[in-house]
Image: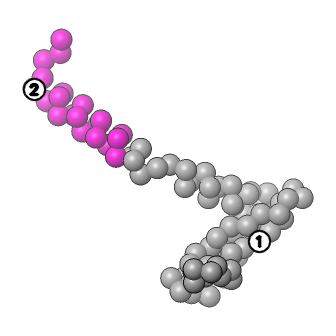
Amino acid sequence: MDAIEGGTASWVLRYRLAGKQREVTLGNYPDISLLRARKKATAARARIDAGIDVAAEKRKSLRRWPAQDVAVNQRARMIGERGQGHRPR
């Protein structure tokens, strides 16, 4: 468990992969219980043992911004509305 000055504590899994020190946050305390953090750590450890960098996976999944989703959904909706009863030019 890591705690910072602001009073937030989180469950962190530290590991070494390909000679480099890595860490991944499993969740914030008390939102995630000790039992749940241990289960998540066990699952992550199995992936690490298979050579997968779970911290890099998590960073990659968090890179997509919600604004991107909004823009894509808005564009799809506009195209759909325009397609109904609209004559092509």
User: Would residue 51 be counted in the magenta stretch?
Assistant: no
Disc nearest the viewer among 1 and 2: 1
Q: Quadrant of the N terminus?
A: bottom right
Residue wearing tag 2:
85
Q: Residue at x 77, y 71 (%)?
A: 14
- Mark 2, Cα crowd under 10 Å, few <14 / some 14-19 / many 20+, is few
Residue wearing tag 1:
14
Q: Secondary structure at mark 1?
A: strand
Q: Reply above or below: 68 against 8.
A: above
Q: Give left or right: position of 65 versus 61.
A: left
- Name the amino acid type tagged 2: Gly
- Name the amino acid type tagged 1: Arg
Q: Position of residue 83 (x, y in %)?
A: 18, 27
Q: Give the quarter of the image for residue 76.
A: top left
- Mark 1, Cα crowd under 10 Å, few <14 / some 14-19 / many 20+, is few
Of the numbered discs 1 and 2, the one sitting upstream in the chain is 1
Q: Reply above or below: 16 against 61.
A: below
Q: Which residues are magenta?
A: 70-89
Q: Reply above or below: 59 against 78.
A: below
**CA separation, marks 1 and 2?**
57 Å
Q: Residue at x 50, y 82 (%)?
A: 31
Q: Position of residue 89 (x, y in %)?
A: 18, 11
The secondary structure that most of the magenta stretch takes on is helix
Q: Position of residue 55 (x, y in %)?
A: 69, 60
User: Would residue 76 be counted in the magenta stretch?
Assistant: yes
